[in-house]
Image (cartoon, rainbow, N blue to C red):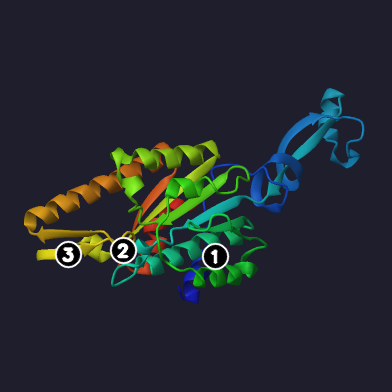
Amino acid sequence: MLEEKVYERLSRLVLAMPHKSSLNMAGSRKSLHKGISAEFSDFREYMPGDDLRRLDWNVYARLDRMYIREYMEEKEAVVNVILDTSASMDFGKEKKSDLAVDLAAVMAYLSLQSMDRVILYDMKEMHRPFPVGGGKNTFARVLQWLEGRGFTGSCDMLASLKRMQRRGAGITVIISDFLHSSTMEEEGAALGKVLNYLSYCRQKPILLQTLCAEELRVDMDGTRNLIDMETGRKLRITMDASAIRSYEEELHRFCRILEQGARRAQGSYVLCDTEKDRNHLIFEDLRVLYDI
């Protein structure tokens, strides 16, 4: 888990929200509804039953017509944080699962401090969402939930996302290595379906791809037996300079597909290296996610 001083620095940041909220709960995001906050929104003509205290007498003096001042009501937004808990995430000397948990904590903390509602999802248990609201005083519940995650088995990302609750426009953060057979096949066609579904749900996608050093910087040589952590399938391969170069080219191509897909969906993509210093990753690499 992250040190307390990381959260102290996070308290000065805000997660960028592309949509105005349409929910009914009080919060700190600007809503589509009109209300009585301090930020002026617009004028409209007086109607019987309106609060006379909101009449603008200066306008009445100029136009001899009665107008009401409207203000922007503040509402909470919803941030979905979906954590890939498949077995492939539990790989690496510096495990992808540890980084994924830290990233989920960061996204939840930023949301809660803005009085947004966070809904945490285990990608293998989408039918059991874990909603948290009420500000950062409830952040301990997030940490408790994250500590209870187990990284085993496999999951279908698109099928899992379709089980996500739909609660209006907002942000959906997917934290994964994205090394699922479905997302890597057909030139990103399955990923396109994932992003199209999020767009249909009026969600801005944030893709945080967690990869470990062993995946990003291959230094094996000789003949090796590789075993798929999720399916158990075995592959015998000879690692030489040519094989490593082909692997790196394919990995870079796949990462570009993720980045371009997120951009087309008006979202964001960040490659997160497990070996990178957490402070640099959170406050520099993730800077594109913050409203600064």
Answer whether residue 221 is visible to the viewer in this image: no
Classify mark 2: helix, strand or loop.
Answer: loop
- Looking at the picture, tell me which residue is in the foreground, 78 or 281: 78
Residue topped by disc 3: 225
Residue holding disc 2: 229
Q: Quadrant of the N terminus?
A: bottom left
Give the answer, above or below, for where 178 lies relative to 6. Answer: above
Q: Which residue is mark 1?
A: 11
- Circles 3 and 2 in contact, beta carbons < 8 Å: no
The secondary structure type at the circle numbered 3 is strand
- From the image, state whether disc 1 or disc 3 is nearer to you: 3
Left or right of 70 in this view: 64: right
At label 2, the amino acid type is Met
Question: Residue 21, can we see it?
Answer: yes
Tell me residue 110's x, y (percent). 54, 60
Foreground pick, 26 / 132: 132
- The three-letter code of the residue at mark 3 reads Asn
**Mark 2 or mark 1: which is in front?**
2
Residue 92 rendering spot, x and y as whole percentages: 29, 69
Q: Residue at x 45, y 69 (%)?
A: 150
Q: Position of residue 137 (x, y in %)?
A: 64, 69
Is disc 1 surrounded by few (<14), some (14 to 19) or many (20+) residues within 10 Å? Answer: some
- Distance of mark 1 from mark 3, alpha carbons? 47 Å
Tell me residue 61's x, y (percent). 86, 29
Q: Earlier in the sequence, mark 1 or mark 3?
A: 1
